[in-house]
Amino acid sequence: MHLLRLSIHATPGARRTEAAGAHGQALRVRLAAPPVDGKANAALIAWAAAALGVPRAQVELLHGASGRQKVLELRFDDAAALAAAQARVACWMAGGADA
């Protein structure tokens, strides 16, 4: 397995779920789910899985279940998939919106 740890600054209650550039060293992600009953965390995991091309079971919330600062760990089957995900995250961090 190839791992990617991703620091996230989550903004729940947005109009739609999307990457929104950098917030310090973290990726800012707007979430179209409210921050109640784990809905925002579930939306974040679903978004990350879909956007980075892995099954939801390969995305884990390591830290920050009750705050805006979160850490996700994504597991990729091969180095090429990991490299593609890292390139996509770099694009988002630079302000690109290819999500």
Image (spheres, rainbow, N blue to C red):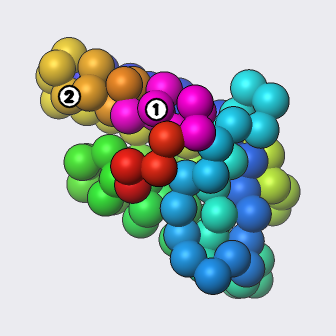
Q: Is residue 36 above or below residue 84?
A: below
Q: Helix, strand, or loop for circle 2?
A: helix
Relative to 91, does residue 68 appear above or below in the rendering? below
The residue lying toward the viewer, choosing from 99 and 38, is 99
Residue 93, quarter of the rendered image: top right
- In space, the residues marked 2 and 1 are separated at their CA atoms by 15 Å
Q: Could you tell whether 84 is left or right of 18 in the image? A: left
Residue position for label 2: 81
Tell me the element at label 1.
Answer: helix
Residue 95 in percent (x, y) is at: 58, 39
Residue occupied by mark 1? 91
Q: Who's the residue at 38% across and 34% down the image?
A: 88
Main secondary structure of the magenta stretch: helix
Q: Magenta segment, which residues?
A: 88-95
Instruction: Tell me the amino acid under the disc marked 2.
Output: Ala
Give percent across and percent down for residue 43. 52, 71
Residue 26 position in % (x across, y down): 70, 34
Q: Name the quarter where the N terminus is drawn.
A: top left
Marking on residue 79: none
Q: How many marks?
A: 2
- Residue 90 counted in the magenta span: yes
Identified by mark 1, the residue type is Cys
For label 2, the crowd category at 10 Å Cα-Cα, with few meaning under 14, some 14 to 19 and many 20 or more, is: some
Q: Can the viewer see residue 33 in this picture? A: no
| The quarter of the displayed image where residue 87 is located | top left
Which residue lies at the image location 43% right of the left edge and 62% below the top edge?
Answer: 47
Report the side of 6 relative to 35 (left or right): left
Residue 98 falls within the magenta-colored stretch = no
Q: Name the one closer to the observer, 49 or 38.
A: 49
Q: Residue at x 75, y 63 (%)?
A: 11
